[in-house]
Image (cartoon, helix red, strand yellow):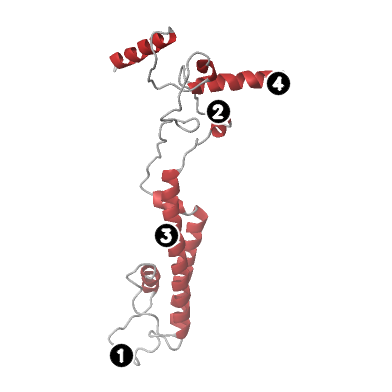
Amino acid sequence: MDKLVRGIESTFWSCYTRKAHIALAPLSVMAERETVVDFTVPYYDLVGIVILMKKPQVPSSLFKFLTVLESNVWGCILAAYFFTSFLMYVFDRLSPYSFHNNREKYKDDDEKRDFTIKECLWFCMTSLTPQGGGEAPRNLSGRLVAATWWLFGFIIIASYTANLAAFLTVSRLDSPIETLDDLAKQYKIKYAPQKDTSTMTYFERMAHIEEKFYE
């Protein structure tokens, strides 16, 4: 590689001293160079200035899935869970059509589920999973509470799934610096152009132009 670089440098030096007719090298077309050498149309040229930066490291967390929703949203979901479970338990105890108050009527049924506070908590928890909550309450008021909880759970799970997919996608594609304006607007990341390149010449010219402009 060093031999190739030295060969290219010697070739261009020979071209500059009028000892060569043509040369091939990775050089950018600039006004100063065109005063000395005639350039052809570049075969390979990048459009604009390319920014090279280290990929930001995103800290991993075991409970990252909890950050999809805010803490107050999680608190409201837990409050709704306990409130619905308690309301279902109260309706099952007060309703005259529940299994708890009509054990003789449903003694021949295969499933005999008494909605105690433990069963109500388990029913509301499993209703949010594909497994399902199991047997619904016998009384109409309890079934209305269960149907409302099912609708609430469907909306919460759909929203959480959509936000989780968007959260994971955006966290992978998020880039703090994309343009030169982003570099100019921040002060945390130190940057500099590569030495003796067209990009360095561009920044030097822009600094000179801005200095003349403010004068």
User: Please, is residue 176 above or below residue 28 in the view?
Assistant: below
Query: Do callouts 4 and 3 mark residues in contact (Cβ within 8 Å)?
Result: no
Q: Amino acid at mark 3?
A: Thr
Query: Do callouts 3 and 1 mark residues in contact (Cβ within 8 Å)?
Result: no
Q: Looking at the rendering, which quadrant does residue 27 occupy?
A: top left
Dot 2 corresponds to which residue?
187
- Report the disc number at residue 107: 1
- Real-space Cα distance between discs 3 and 1? 42 Å
- Real-space Cα distance between discs 4 and 3? 53 Å
User: Please, is residue 180 above or below residue 70 in the view?
Assistant: above
**Front label number (4 vs 1):** 4
**Front label number (4 vs 3):** 4
- Real-space Cα distance between discs 4 and 1? 94 Å
Query: In front: 79, or 175?
Result: 175
- Real-space Cα distance between discs 4 and 2? 22 Å
- Report the disc number at residue 161: 3
Query: Do callouts 2 and 1 mark residues in contact (Cβ within 8 Å)?
Result: no
Dot 4 corresponds to which residue?
214
Q: Amino acid at mark 4?
A: Tyr
Q: Amino acid at mark 1?
A: Lys
- Residue at 49% across / 63% down in the picture? 79
Query: In front: 164, or 33?
Result: 33
